[in-house]
Structures are given as C-alpha cells and as structure tokens.
Image (spheres, rainbow, N blue to C red):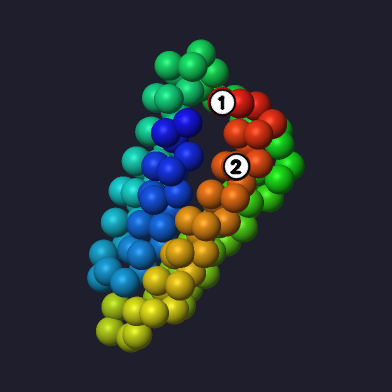
C-alpha cells in the first residue's frame, strides 16, 4: 500500500526535474522508481509482473505523459508554475490509478 504514494511523489519529482539544469537528475529519479518497484516486487514474489487493470494502466500512461510534457515545457530560467502544475497533475492522475488498482486487487 505504501508503494502508491511513493510512486506518486517520485513521478511529481521527475516532472519537477525540468526546472533543473541537469538532465541526469531525471535519469537518476527514473532509476530510483524502477529500483523501488523491482525490489518491492521481489519481496512480493512477482518482480516483473505488470498490472492488468486498464484504469490503472491508463492513469500510469497519462501521468507519464504529464512528466514528458513537463520536460518539454520546463525551462530553468522561465516561469516554474507550468511545470509545478503538470507535476501535480502527474501525481494526482497516478493517485487515481492507484485507487483503481487497489480496489481491484486489494494489494
């Protein structure tokens, strides 16, 4: 259950890396997201299993699109509000998907 909010925060942080000068920060956060999910999967006995709930998968795709959009519109010297808005959208959309997934699996 704790994995859902952790992933939502990490997705929002990934979107916010658009405000930094270092492109390596996005890659580092992506590695953390993958590591946290794989380690948790190993502990559950299914490290490479993918969810099949369509609502969850749709929300994950939309939140990933939000992260990509933040990277596209983000400019370290420009206004921060568009990136912050898209980061909040990524976390919110993922959270909705996690509720859908939890309701269908109770995990």
Residue 5: percent from left, percent from top: 43, 43
The residue lying furthest to the bottom in this view is 78
C-alpha gap between disc 2 and disc 1: 10 Å
| Residue at image location 35% in from the left, 85% down from the top | 79
| Residue at image location 48% in from the left, 23% down from the top | 41
Residue 17: percent from left, percent from top: 33, 63
> Can you say whether 85 is above or below 45 in the image?
below
> Can you say whether 17 is above or below 75 in the image?
above
Residue 13: percent from left, percent from top: 36, 57
**Label tally:** 2
Residue 75 appears in the figure: no
> Is label 2 in contact with label 1 (beta carbons under 8 Å)?
no
Query: For the residue carrying disc 1, how many other residues have a C-alpha within 10 Å: few (<14), some (14-19), or many (20+)?
Result: few
In the picture provided, is 99 more to the left or to the right than 52?
left
Query: For the residue carrying disc 2, how many other residues have a C-alpha within 10 Å: few (<14), some (14-19), or many (20+)?
Result: some
Task: Provide the residue designation for mark 2.
Answer: 99
The residue lying furthest to the right in this view is 54
| Residue at image location 54% in from the left, 18% down from the top | 46
Residue 14, picture quadrant: bottom left
- Per the image, label 1 sits on a secondary structure element best described as loop
The one of 73 and 11 positioned closer to us in this rendering = 11
Tell me, for residue 61, which label it has, or none: none
**Quadrant holding the C terminus:** top right
Task: Provide the residue designation for mark 1.
Answer: 107
Please report whichever mark, 2 or 1, sits nearer to the chain's N-terminal start.
2
Residue 39: percent from left, percent from top: 40, 25
């Amino acid at each position: 259950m704790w994995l859902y909010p952790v992933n939502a925060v990490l997705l929002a942080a990934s979107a916010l890396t658009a405000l930094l000068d270092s492109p390596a920060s996005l890659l580092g956060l992506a590695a953390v997201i993958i590591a946290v999910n794989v380690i948790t999967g190993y502990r559950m006995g299914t490290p490479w299993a993918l969810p099949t709930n369509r609502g969850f998968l749709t929300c994950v795709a939309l939140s990933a699109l939000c992260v990509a959009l933040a990277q596209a519109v983000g400019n370290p010297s420009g206004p921060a509000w568009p990136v912050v808005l898209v980061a909040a959208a990524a976390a919110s959309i993922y959270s909705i998907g996690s509720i859908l997934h939890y309701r269908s699996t109770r995990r």
